[in-house]
Amino acid sequence: MPVVAVSSLTTAGLSIRGLGRRVLEKSLPSPREVPAPAPSRPEDIRQRKLMSRAAWFSALVMREALAEAKWSDARAEIGAFFGVGASGAEMDEVARLVAASMDGDRFSLACCGGAGLDACNPLFAFQIMNNFTLCHGAILEGLAGPNAAFFSRGTGTVTALEEACAAVESGACERALVGGADTALHPVTLAELEREGFLRQGLLPAEGAAVLAIASAAEAPIGRVEAVRVFPVERPRGALVPRTGVLRDAAVPAALDALDDQPCDVVVLAPWGAPAREALMDLPEVLEATLSVDASLVLGESLAASPALAWVLALDLLAHLDKPRALVLSAGPDGDLGAVVLGRGVGGRSSARPSVTPIGGGGA
């Protein structure tokens, strides 16, 4: 599947090129709040009031990718598939909702559906519906082709790529945008990550967005999606994530299945914290990769956006280093594995594979 354009939003800002170079040079700012550009067009200013922070991220990377791809025509036929995170509403609205939804000292769904929603601005709904992380950008850019938003703690974003490729391959659309946008810095999300123990396990909360523009055909693609796989991983009853050993045992078969016996020059890992990092750290050496990068150490963990950011990073590394193939293996807080194999665009060539050079620490 040809990749025609990419766009990413990280602490380095909004860009379509250079993420791989900056990672190799270790010149990226530390993961923190992203400096997203303010809206400037009148329609942006109006709609921004209805958007969560992640939705604005999504709209920005969509616009940049469409511009790079030069897709100004027939936008109503372009598909859109995104991994999206939890609601990212304004906290004062959340506080009013929660206060009006209490039945004594307990939160009541019945009260929430009545008094709770009545206590909020009606436009609040557009911030709390997580599918609007996709919808706002699609509305602003006039995208009306096949579409789907997948709630994601990692694997959902890989599923979005599966669905986007299937839509293009089946002829449902000839072009599509696919990616993810999210923030792990929203107070409600941070509280969840702390409650479930992810922060204590080394997860580095961040935010960002990234998107690929894919097409059924392209004369000079910047890359190719060669394989997309989602691998459910067994976990203990009642547990959110698998044990480290189980995840480690699943990682190598998943990688080899996705690669289909083809060599791999670059490995980009996107683990959700120390347990997943430990499980994946031996994979680059097993695959005899030239270079390995731990994306979550340099970009942080932005949940639904993490796999998409890792794809853009991998494509940029292939172009920068002139390598033919990369494997991106993501293991989000949902515990499952997502494997994506990406190929170099025009002008790629094979190369020898010396010992692994880890970037980002942790041996991966």
Image (spheres, grey):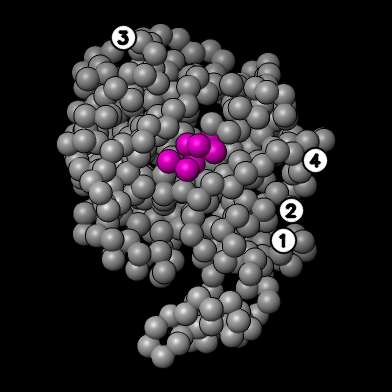
Q: Please report whichever mark, 1 or 4, sits nearer to the chain's N-terminal start.
A: 1
Callout 4–callout 2 Cβ contact below 8 Å: no
Residue 281 counted in the magenta span: no
Task: Farthest residue to the right: give it.
Answer: 74
Measuring 58% from the left and 77% from the top, which residue is drawn there? 113
Q: Secondary structure at mark 4?
A: helix
Q: Amino acid at mark 1?
A: Asp
Q: Nearer the viewer, mark 1 or mark 4?
A: 4
Q: How much space separates mark 3 and mark 4, taking CA atoms?
A: 45 Å
Q: Residues within 10 Å of mark 3 (few under 14, many from 20)?
A: few
Q: Secondary structure at mark 1?
A: helix
- Residue interval drawn in magenta: 155-161
Residue 352, numbered label:
3
Figure check: 190 above or below 332: below
- Report the quarter where the C terminus lies: top left
Q: Position of residue 55 (x, y in %)?
A: 59, 57
Q: Nearer the viewer, mark 3 or mark 4?
A: 4
Residue 140, numbered label:
2
Q: Position of residue 354 (x, y in %)?
A: 24, 14
Q: How much space separates mark 3 and mark 2, taking CA atoms?
A: 46 Å
Q: How much space separates mark 4 and mark 2, taking CA atoms?
A: 12 Å
Q: Nearer the viewer, mark 3 or mark 2?
A: 2
Residue assigned mark 4: 76
Q: Amino acid at mark 4?
A: Ala
Q: Please report whichever mark, 3 or 4, sits nearer to the chain's N-terminal start.
A: 4
Callout 1–callout 2 Cβ contact below 8 Å: yes
